[in-house]
Amino acid sequence: MKSQLKLAGLALALSCSALTAQAANVTLTTWAFGTGNSVAVVGTHPYSGKAGGFVGSLVGAGSFDNNPFITYCIELTESFNFGGSAMTGYAVVDGADYFLRRYNDASKSDQLGRLMTYAYGDAARVDTAAESTSLQLAIWNVIYDTDQNVTARGASFRDTSIYGGYADTLLAGGAATLTSRFNVYALERAGSQDFLLLSAISTPQSGNSSIPEPASLALAMLALGVAGAATRRKPISVAAA
């Protein structure tokens, strides 16, 4: 059964406030759409395993706190385990600063914002486990490559699974999207998997400089036409990148 991804799990900043200075706790209990799917990534950072969105809770991050919290992985080189125990010590980091420092390219933040704007501009674009897997591949491609293609031979990031084709579709849609409707952040902890964090902005800009207004969540839900709830299942113990 299809389950639409709840924008509330992504659009987390509900007030005009500075990034949290305290350590945040991330608890991820299961896949956002019930399961992840196996991918086969080759290139600079090869990866063979499951991929997709995750659901859980985020606490200790001030106005970013949310339950259910829905997110995607940033890194291919780190892993984590689902479960009821919180992963402690995360910091909320501005996306442009994070990608400049970690990947030498601040523009990846805006690229991800436009990708996610396209992905959730229509609720049907990402509302299954397979589509969520493709979105994770698209996110990784933005981070680890400079093209808009997951399936191209010889690229720094290439996937050979059945989910790469739709990832290309999402990437093309994101590239054609002129303005991002999200501010992009990273949940960062040294030596652990980092996670994508978004907040809706009420007035789309070409970059991520706009500060979310208190009503930005409701406005974004109306503008993007996204509603529904994340799939809730019992915690499982699975390593995921």
Image (cartoon, rainbow, N blue to C red):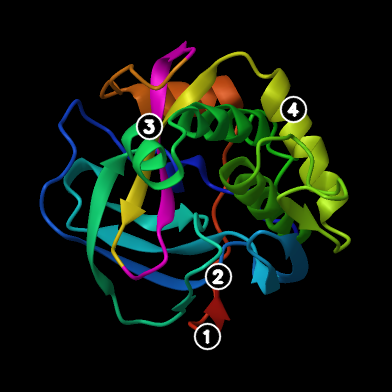
Residue 60 image position (x, y, % from top left): 17, 57
Label 4, label 3: how far apart the Cα atoms are: 21 Å
Q: Is residue 199 magenta?
A: yes
Is there a contact, CB below 8 Å, between mark 4 and mark 3? no
Q: Is residue 36 visible?
A: no
- Amino acid type of the residue that numbered disc 1 sits on in the rendered structure: Ile
> What residue does disc 2 label?
241
Label 2, label 3: how far apart the Cα atoms are: 22 Å
Of the two numbered discs 3 and 1 on the same chain, state the one appearing first in sequence.
3
Instruction: Tell me what residue is drawn at x 63 percent, y 63 percent.
Output: 45
> What residue does disc 3 label?
96
Q: Quadrant of residue 87?
A: bottom left
Give neighbour class at mark 3: few <14, some 14-19, many 20+ (Cα, 10 Å).
Answer: many
Of the two numbered discs 2 and 3 on the same chain, state the one appearing first in sequence.
3
Question: Which is closer to the viewer, label 3 or label 1?
Answer: 3
Instruction: Tell me what residue is drawn at x 19 percent, y 38 percent.
Output: 19
Question: Which is closer to the viewer, label 4 or label 3?
Answer: 3
Q: Is residue 137 visible?
A: yes
Residue 221 image position (x, y, % from top left): 50, 29
Q: Is residue 150 above or below residue 55?
A: above
Element marked by disc 2: loop
Of the two numbered discs 4 and 3 on the same chain, state the one appearing first in sequence.
3
Element marked by disc 1: loop
- Amino acid type of the residue that numbered disc 2 sits on in the rendered structure: Ala
- Amino acid type of the residue that numbered disc 3 sits on in the rendered structure: Ala
Figure quadrant of the N terminus? bottom right
* The magenta segment: 191-206
> What residue does disc 4 label?
173
Considering depth in this image, is 50 or 30 the residue closer to the camera? 50
Q: Main secondary structure of the magenta part?
A: strand
> What residue does disc 1 label?
236
